[in-house]
Image (cartoon, rainbow, N blue to C red):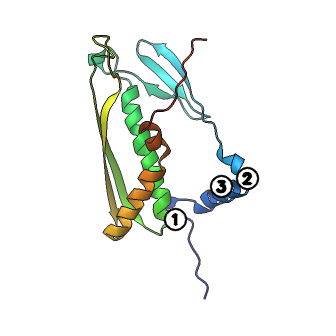
Amino acid sequence: MASTVTTTLNDVNMEAVAGLAGKIQQEPGVAATEWKARVDWKGGFRSEASVREFAPLASDEPGALGGTDTGPNPVEQVLAALGNCLAVGYAANATAAGITLHDMSIELSGNLDLHTFLGLRDGNAGYENISVKVNIDSDASPEALQALHEKVVGTSPVGHTMSRAVPVSIELA
């Protein structure tokens, strides 16, 4: 009897992923994509990011930084973006490898010195370091989970973006 591979392992539609990969192999130009977001200021330190047709994502600063704490601040959103990207990578690559994920959580933290942000001295206004701890509940062997981990870290778009210098052009219109 022929075996069939489920496409819903870990709730991931691998047919869609495989279809895109196949299309890119046939037409390499399809891989070059552009992603967009728009941010609108809402007063004070509040803003909303609009992405495609989704509900706006609120952003604000905590009260100690002069905000009204109505949403995560941008540096917290950076951590969340990395964690979300890694979660996608683990789900997709685990599914491709036939690994069942029972549960997964990703804890992220980063150290940031506010001196530069507050204009008190020159230097790095961004994170000095970021630590990530991935917790996976799976019946897979430790070796399979390590291979999965290495694959995900090696292919994470947000991880790669954050770990190297990326040219950023900011202009006043």
User: Which is in the foreground here, disc 2 or disc 1?
Assistant: 2
- Helix, strand or loop at mark 1: helix
Residue 7 showing in the rendered view: yes
User: Which is in the foreground here, disc 2 or disc 3?
Assistant: 2
Q: Amino acid at mark 1?
A: Ala
- Helix, strand or loop at mark 2: loop
Q: Which residue corresponds to the image point at 61% horizontal and 85% vertical from the top-left?
A: 2
Quarter location, residue 64:
top left
User: Which is more N-terminal, label 3 or label 2?
Assistant: 3
Q: Are marks 2 and 3 in contact (CB under 8 Å)?
A: no
- Residue 66: x %, y % from top left: 32, 13
- Disc 2: CA contacts within 10 A as few (<14), some (14-19) or many (>=20): few
Q: Amino acid at mark 3?
A: Leu
Residue with the mark numbered 2: 27
- Residue 128: x %, y % from top left: 30, 31
User: Which is more N-terminal, label 1 or label 2?
Assistant: 2
Residue with the mark numbered 3: 20
Residue with the mark numbered 1: 96
